[in-house]
Amino acid sequence: MKFLLNRIAASVPTLLGVTLLAFFMIRWIPGDPITVMLGDRGGDPEMIAELKSIYGLDRPLISQYFQFLGNLLRMDLGKSILSHNAVLDEFTARFPATVELGLVALVWSSALGIILGVLAAVFRRSFLDYSLMGVSLVGYSMPIFWWGLLLILFFSVLLGWLPVSGRMSVMYDIPEKTGFLLIDSLFSEERWPAFWDAVKHLTLPALALGTIPLAAIARMTRSSLLEVLKEDYIRTAKAKGLGVKSLIFKHALKNALTPIITVIGLMLGALLTGAILTETIFSWPGIGRWIVQAVNARDYPVIQGGVLLVSLTIILVNILVDSLYFWVNPTLRK
């Protein structure tokens, strides 16, 4: 409990720094919500001054910032300038889509990354090892926007196997009970056809988003496992004739999990930020695309609230990962 309280307390300055960045950096970009709202029509100075007064944009920045902090203390993130909906409501409506995408990407990349890392460590300095690590390096270096476009070109345009955008075809009317379409589709009337349609829409974005975590997890698994395999107790187990399968999965891999869990936790945070590009490319209606649209429209409350809530999510994930260390590595509890 003391550990959790210390971690939560240490997160407060981080969140304060996020509020500063989210509030001031967007205002350094040329333009403002009123200019974007009026568009090419422009508007006379009196109309512009009246609209700025309505949205509180005519006051000094410091005054606006402290009002923003005061509203945060009351759990009020404000309302979108464009839609006039509460920022928190818009966030909660889109957050399940981003979580579903991120979790699917993390699950497949973690499972495959650990398997590939174990194979590379077991067959160290072999052709398989060099091939797997070479492919992982390419995957880690591949920009998401380029990789996403290649996936669309191959699987959607050339082969026509998978849809390009969205979460589900318009032919299915799925009542959103949880916000996760993979789950909600199973409780709909169409059930399996709707579920399969949701899977097909999710495949390309999850594949694009999970490529970088896959490469990082595979490389870390290989490195961590090789370090453990050098330990004396592993040599002793080998000398006693313990099989390779038991040696790896019952002894070595468990002790190699701590840095792997670290990378997986960091990758979960990276998935939330990487989802900005992925959701934009695949028109995925999640938090990333929502924030990009808000930046283009200079919707200050959405940007401030969205960035803050995403940062809070990443901080909570990191606290959870740190807590898992105590379960995986008992020596940390001493």
Image: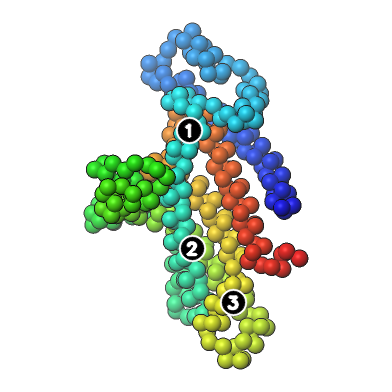
In the rendered image of this protein, does residue 10 appear above or below residue 77? below
Q: Position of residue 212 (x, y in %)?
A: 47, 58
Which one is closest to the eye, mark 1 or mark 3? 1
Q: Position of residue 170 (x, y in %)?
A: 26, 41
- Residue lying at 52% horizontally and 62% vertically, measured from the top left: 216
Q: Is residue 207 left or right of residue 9?
A: left
- Residue lying at 34% horizontally and 49% vertically, measured from the top left: 187
Identify the mark at residue 110; answer none if there is no mark.
2
Report which quarter residue 304 is drawn in. top right
Write down the residue under mark 3: 252
Which one is closest to the eye, mark 2 or mark 1? 1
Q: Position of residue 236 (x, y in %)?
A: 65, 87
Sequence-first tag of 2 and 1: 1
Q: Amino acid at mark 2?
A: Ser
Sequence-first tag of 1 and 3: 1
Q: Position of residue 64 (x, y in %)?
A: 62, 23
In the rendered image of this protein, does residue 139 appear above or below residue 297? below
**Would you say the residues marked 2 and 3 are in contact, meaning their CB atoms lie under 8 Å apart?**
no
Write down the residue under mark 1: 89
Crowd around label 3: few <14 · some 14–19 · many ≥20 (10 Å): many
Q: Amino acid at mark 3?
A: Ala
